[in-house]
Image (cartoon, helix red, strand yellow):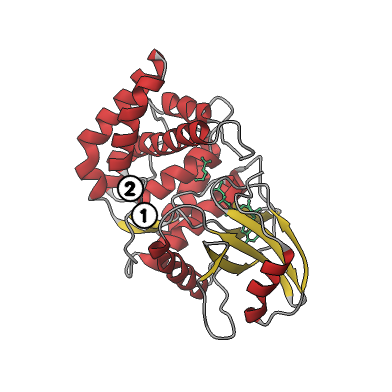
Amino acid sequence: MSVFTPLARPELETFLAPYGLGRLLDFQGIAAGSENTNFFISLEQGEFVLTLVERGPVQEMPFFIELLDVLHEADLPVPYALRTTDGVALRELAGKPALLQPRLAGKHIKEANAQHCSQVGELLGHLHLATQDNMIKRKTDRGLDWMLEEGTQLLSHLNAEQSDLLQRALEEITQQKTKILALPRANIHADLFRDNAMFEGTHLTGLIDFYNACSGPMLYDVAIALNDWCSDEAGLIDGPRARALLGAYAALRPFTAAEAELWPTMLRVACVRFWLSRLIAAESFAGQDVLIHDPMEFQQRLAQRQKVSTPLPFAL
Ligand SMILES: Nc1ncnc2c1ncn2[C@@H]1O[C@H](COP(=O)(O)OP(=O)(O)OP(=O)(O)O)[C@@H](O)[C@H]1O
Ligand SMILES: N[C@@H](CCO)C(=O)O
């Protein structure tokens, strides 16, 4: 399970006291998740989630706190950093940046249908509209340059079929980089997979795990979400789910001509991002008790995105 940093009750009690939320009733490490350490925390005054951030520099933390405050104030269903009675949001525990957040209701969906996808498209549209005019700058640490650098290094670890596929995608990124970076931007979640959304029935009750959020092309966020929510077992795009997600999004923020042109490229870029991060995680955590997502899933999706037959809904 992915509890990189185990905690003992006394240190947790000391950490939680300044929030003034009552006594610690129970706590439990969360097995799901592959990047940070999370605990469900029961206090007398409610249910919370404690996150110890395991990746990235501490200087980045004010960005996440501010972004979640903005989205919470825009009435989006997101967690946000609770303050101690002295008004402190960013704390430290076991040497890691630590945040206490409200626990959101709902469960993750394994089998998404068109209604779920429509809700995801709508929420993504609201997220981008809430930030595009007042974007908070943060450069992602897994952007196009990262893909080119890490991808080139990984080529020699792959078999011939894999390295051909990756090489072709890296060449496309090099060619299209300037155009991609010129697309309309906002704050993006950049990791909106099924395991980062909570549902009650077909109602989306929460969007979590903003630790990959950054400022970037909105289309990239749409492509990342679509690749997870609207792929079938063979990695092909499921037309009805994809049209539901894209239609709900476009009803809030219509796509531009430049976005429509770069759509197939963007779907491939979004596959490369997660294929590479999964390959790297599989190498670095091999043999450890850490959740590792299957890299092959994104190799297969990238192969299937060489031809894209679901265009963006874009009216000339
Ligand atoms: N605010 C919250 N409310 C309810 N559950 C939460 C909340 N935050 C996290 N969780 C639970 O903890 C799990 C792991 O959290 P999260 O996805 O943030 O971890 P991670 O290690 O960053 O994961 P990932 O593999 O997506 O990077 C989630 O799948 C969810 O079940
Ligand atoms: N959502 C990512 C893990 C966190 O970045 C994946 O499935 O590879």
Q: Is residue 5 above or below residue 104?
A: above
Q: How many marks?
A: 2
Per the image, the residue denoted by label 1 is: 254
Q: What is the x, y in percent for residue 114?
A: 59, 44
- Between circles 1 and 2, the one closer to the viewer is 1
Q: Secondary structure at mark 1?
A: loop
**Does the closest atom of ligand 2 sit within 8 Å of the Cβ of label 1?**
no
Q: Mark 1 vs mark 2: which is more N-terminal?
A: 1
Query: Where on the picture, by quarter, is residue 45?
Result: bottom right
Residue 213 image offset from top left, x and y in percent = 43, 56
Query: Which numbered dot is residue 165?
Result: none
Residue at 20% across / 44% down in the picture? 178
Q: Quadrant of ligand 1?
A: bottom right
Asked whether the beta carbons under mark 1 and mark 2 sit within 8 Å of each other, the answer is yes
Judge whether residue 203 can be spotted in this image.
Answer: no
Q: Residue at image x 48%, y 25%? A: 300
Vertical relation: 224 (above or below) 252: above
The N terminus lies in quadrant: top right
The amino acid type, in three-letter code, at marker 2 is: Ala
Task: Specify the amino acid type for callout 1.
Answer: Pro
Distance, label 1 to label 2, CA atoms, is 9 Å
Furthest residue toward bottom:
86
Q: Residue 120 appears at what percent x and percent y?
A: 54, 52
> Measuring 47% from the left and 69% from the top, which residue is drawn there?
65
Mark 2 closeness class: few <14, some 14–19, many ≥20 residues within 10 Å? few
Is residue 274 in view? Answer: yes
Image point 61% across, 40% down: which residue? Answer: 290
Decide which of 60, 232 is in the foreground and name it. Answer: 60
* 41 or 301, nearer to the observer: 41
On the image, numbered disc 2 is attached to which residue?
315
> Considering the numbered disc 2 on the image, is that residue within a helix, a strand or a loop?
loop
Q: Position of residue 132 (x, y in %)?
A: 34, 64
